[in-house]
Image: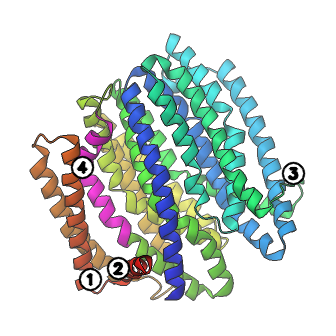
């Protein structure tokens, strides 16, 4: 019980810090929507961002996940060994990233990229400029995330969530000073500059730990080979939502102007919410998975994973339903102003509500991937995530004729949910009692009741013309009511572990 409470407190703290940082990110997106809306110019920006910085952050996150077990193991040996292996990993990755940037510049200049992006003429020239600017962030992003892996291994669980604070603050200041859509170039330059501020955010941790970055290039190092193998698999599995999102954006690009921007804004609203919850949990649990696996047998380890997964689903399931049900007021309150009009809201709501329904699948897939990595198993998550991507491609093609961005987003949610369920079945298939199916069944029943209530509230109040402040108050209250009903039903059905942890944490906070 004590270990569970410690883990729960760590996750709660990381969640609070990450939520604060992501809230600033939402403010940034609100100001961005106000400045640029779903204009053709913003379509070009979102295309450039999606194919550079978004991919780079996903790549760097995969490198971070692959580095944590190696650095954690070396820390158990000695601090010097950990610094040495970290320096080698960082040096090699920085060298590769610089080569990739050089290759990217050549590709933009000499390859017919207009065939892939569907733009030509003046818009193609603008897109090429945006892509070149965004490319330079790759080495910075790689360095940031590999340093995060070092300090995460040392117990700085909140670092990854908090480092976007200076990034978001800087861009909020820039957006407040941008008068209109004609300042897109300046904004992209500011985005790249803001990444450098995230690197500075890590400096206090390095000073506190007296960490020395021992840069070196040792290509024959066995740890580097293990890292490379794990990183390749991790890159694909941690990129699964990005791949599905890019597929969605590519599919809807033929639906008319603004469709790509609508998917972009839905993703930028969905991603902060889901990563606040999922990554706050996984950033604490992943090192603990490694510790548990080293000190227990397979059955005990899988039971630990099963318990953490059940606790996570307890939180994710009702949140997913509420976001889906209240998607219209959420988007209207946050985004609908300035260049972001009612038609932009309608397009974004359709996509966001469908993405929200896939939160549980996304969460399960992320946690199960890390549970597999801890056991040094990479083939199972690779195959499962491959099936998710293939299924998403098939469903996108099947539903593209409807020209409905919401249907395309639903395809992604269904694919992620399929992958999450399949991953659980494969992981727990020979571990009787490690995962409580009956508990999840109870939670699904409670969620089904709450979903009926939430969608009834959304339908009943959607036709009323409320101001934004009243909408926030009303739907916040209705959300609390729904969560209260969910908690009461779970309590009556004897699903009380997370509720008891929350109660103990609240009591300790008051004391």
* Horizontal and vertical percent position of residue 390: 47, 50
Numbered disc in front, either 3 or 4: 4
| Range of residues picked out in magenta | 314-336
Q: What residue is shown with label 1?
A: 491
Q: Which of marks 1 and 3 is nearer the N terminus?
A: 3
Q: Which of marks 4 and 2 is nearer the N terminus?
A: 4
Q: What residue is shown with label 3?
A: 215
Q: Do the residues labelled 4 and 1 touch (CB within 8 Å)?
A: no
Which numbered disc covers residue 472?
4
Q: Is mark 2 on a helix, strand or loop?
A: helix
Q: Is mark 3 on a helix, strand or loop?
A: loop
Which numbered disc covers residue 511?
none
Q: What residue is shown with label 2?
A: 499
Q: In which quarter of the image is the C terminus?
A: bottom left
Up the image or down, 435 lies above or below 415; here it is below
* Nearer to me, 119 or 188: 188
* Horizontal and vertical percent position of residue 45: 50, 27
Q: Residue 42's quadrant in the figure?
A: top left
Answer yes or no: is residue 232 visible.
Answer: no
| Alpha-carbon span between mark 3 and mark 2 | 47 Å
Q: What element carries label 1?
A: helix
| Alpha-carbon span between mark 2 and mark 1 | 8 Å
């Amino acid at each position: 019980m004590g270990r569970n409470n410690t883990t729960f407190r760590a996750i709660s703290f990381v969640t609070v810090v990450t939520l604060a940082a992501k809230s600033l990110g939402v403010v940034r997106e609100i100001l961005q929507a106000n400045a640029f809306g779903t204009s053709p110019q913003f379509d070009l920006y979102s295309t450039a961002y999606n194919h550079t910085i978004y991919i780079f952050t996903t790549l760097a996150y995969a490198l971070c996940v692959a580095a944590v077990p190696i650095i954690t193991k070396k820390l158990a040996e000695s601090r010097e060994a950990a610094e040495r292996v970290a320096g080698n990993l960082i040096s090699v990755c920085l060298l590769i990233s610089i080569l990739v940037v050089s290759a990217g510049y050549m590709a933009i200049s000499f390859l017919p990229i207009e065939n892939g992006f569907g733009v030509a003429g003046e818009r193609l020239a603008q897109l090429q400029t945006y892509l070149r600017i965004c490319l330079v962030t790759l080495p910075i992003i790689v360095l940031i995330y590999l340093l995060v892996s070092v300090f995460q291994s040392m117990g700085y669980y909140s670092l990854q969530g908090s480092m976007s604070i200076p990034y978001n603050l800087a861009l909020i200041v820039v957006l407040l000073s941008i008068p209109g859509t004609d300042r897109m170039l300046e904004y992209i330059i500011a985005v790249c500059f803001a990444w450098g501020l995230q690197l500075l955010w890590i400096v206090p941790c390095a000073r506190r730990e007296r960490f020395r970055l021992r840069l070196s290039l040792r290509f024959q190092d066995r740890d580097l080979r293990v890292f490379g193998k794990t990183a390749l698999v991790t890159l694909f599995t941690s990129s699964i939502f990005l791949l599905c999102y890019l597929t969605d954006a590519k599919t809807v690009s033929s639906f008319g102007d603004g469709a790509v921007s609508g998917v972009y804004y839905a993703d930028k609203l969905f991603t902060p919410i889901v990563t606040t919850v999922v990554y706050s949990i996984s950033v604490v649990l992943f090192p603990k998975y490694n510790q548990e696996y080293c000190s227990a047998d397979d059955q005990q380890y899988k039971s630990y994973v099963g318990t953490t997964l059940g606790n996570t689903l307890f939180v994710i399931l009702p949140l997913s339903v509420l976001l889906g049900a209240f998607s219209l007021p959420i988007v209207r309150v946050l985004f609908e102003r300035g260049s972001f009009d009612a038609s932009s809201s309608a397009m974004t709501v359709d996509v966001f509500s469908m993405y929200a329904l896939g939160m549980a699948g996304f969460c399960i897939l992320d946690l199960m991937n890390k549970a597999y990595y801890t056991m040094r198993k990479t083939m199972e998550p690779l195959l499962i995530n491959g099936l998710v991507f293939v299924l998403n491609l098939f469903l996108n093609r099947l539903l593209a004729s409807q020209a409905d961005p919401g249907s395309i987003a639903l395809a992604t949610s269904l694919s992620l949910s399929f992958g999450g369920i399949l991953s659980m079945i494969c992981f727990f298939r020979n571990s009787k009692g490690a995962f409580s199916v009956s508990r999840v069944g109870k939670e699904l029943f409670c969620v089904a009741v709450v979903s009926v209530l939430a969608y009834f509230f959304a339908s009943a109040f959607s036709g009323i013309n409320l101001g934004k402040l009243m909408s926030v108050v009303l739907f916040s209250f209705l959300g609390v009511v729904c969560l209260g009903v969910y908690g009461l039903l779970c309590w009556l059905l004897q699903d009380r572990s997370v509720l008891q942890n929350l109660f103990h944490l609240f009591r300790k906070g008051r004391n």
